[in-house]
Amino acid sequence: MSAFARLRLFRPILAGATLRDRALACFGALMGIGLSAVIGGLAAADLNHLVWIVPPMGASAVLLFAVPASPMAQPWPAIGGNVISAAIGVAIGHFMPLTALSAGLAVALAIGAMSLLRCLHPPGGAAALVGLFIGGSSSLLFPFVPVGLNAVVLVASAWLYHRLSGHSYPHVAAPPQPARARDLPWTISKADIAATLAEVGEAYDIGAEDLEELVRHIEKRAVARSYHQLSCADLMVKNVISVPEDASPEQARALLVKRDIRRLAVVDAEGRLVGSVGLRELVHPAGQVRDAMTPAAAAAPASPAIDLLERYARDRVHAVFVIDAARRPVGVVTEADWLHVLTRGLG
């Protein structure tokens, strides 16, 4: 196996994870488990308990320090999931002998209780088994000390650690920004996400709010990548209809009506773009077109076509004229041209 292939084995398998995050998670787990063990040991000595830290805390530490954004790594699942599951295991051990059936029942009831109480936490399954193994009247405190105490100290350690490392914990998803029509050719809604999850039929270790925010960012990046590859030269119509600046308003009006367009390019004697005119400007009396024209929206052929969307919305322009280095119009991109592109992207 090559050195490069061996390095690939150590790549994080979680989306968004880095080797730096995993290294820091190791340090966080060292701090959290160590502190939980010390405090659990003090409590165990005072209460005459032999167990000062329970094995499920190792699994909880993986979630709390390595994937703090997971819904199953939040404080209530970490504490409630472990305590409730341990209590179920103790109860099963009190009323049933230690058998394969009682082990399966303990874990099954733990999953059901955690699901109903919205505190699903994978290490809770292990806590249920540990509670089952030591079940009996002498272990009624076990779900609280050491399990509950360990979990509370571990969560507090995770909160402190993530405060120092810069991660959000307890994790709260940022509210997704609403999509704007000029940003995206389509809008993905919460209903779309819920329907897709129902159609796929799989459960993923990510909150619905986080998933929506992630989809929004991916959506924007995909659109930017796709449409930034289009230049004005790719979209423009080369047959630019123009009128000389010294033409009469009647000539310009007749040309607009005949060609059924909203804007005319106004050019000087050298063919350079000096303005634009539409029927709205020609309503007012004017001796020549130059007296009625307004500044023309212009762009270079190599300009990203997506930049025109903001100009349509912000400046209320209906056509952007594409000009060469000498300011001669070589094409035009209208709102209708962009609508055609967006409609094609939806097909």
Image (cartoon, helix red, strand yellow):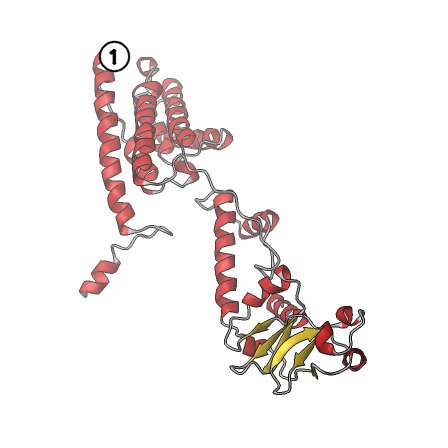
Badge 1 marks a residue whose secondary structure is helix
At 58% across and 77% down in the image, what residue appears? 322
Residue found at the far bottom of this picture: 270
Q: Is residue 287 left or right of residue 35?
A: right
- Relative to 47, is 269 above or below? below
- From the viewer's side, name the closer residue of 161 and 113: 161
* Residue 48 relative to residue 127: left or right: left
Residue at 60% over, 50% down: 189
Which of the 4 image quadrants contains residue 252?
bottom right
Write down the quadrant of residue 70 in the picture.
top left
Image vertical order of residue 171 relative to residue 91, above or below: below
Give how far across and how far down residue 161 sits, in percent: 29, 35
Q: Residues within 10 Å of mark 1 (few under 14, many from 20)?
A: few
Q: Which residue is mark 1?
A: 47
Quadrant containing the C terminus in the rendered view? bottom right
The spot of residue 290 in percent (x, y) is 70, 77
Name the spot of residue 268 as percent of width and height, x first.
64, 83
Kindly identify the residue that appears in the image at 81 percent across and 72 percent down.
285
Q: Is residue 123 depicted above or below 93 in this figure?
A: below
Can the viewer see residue 161 in this picture? yes
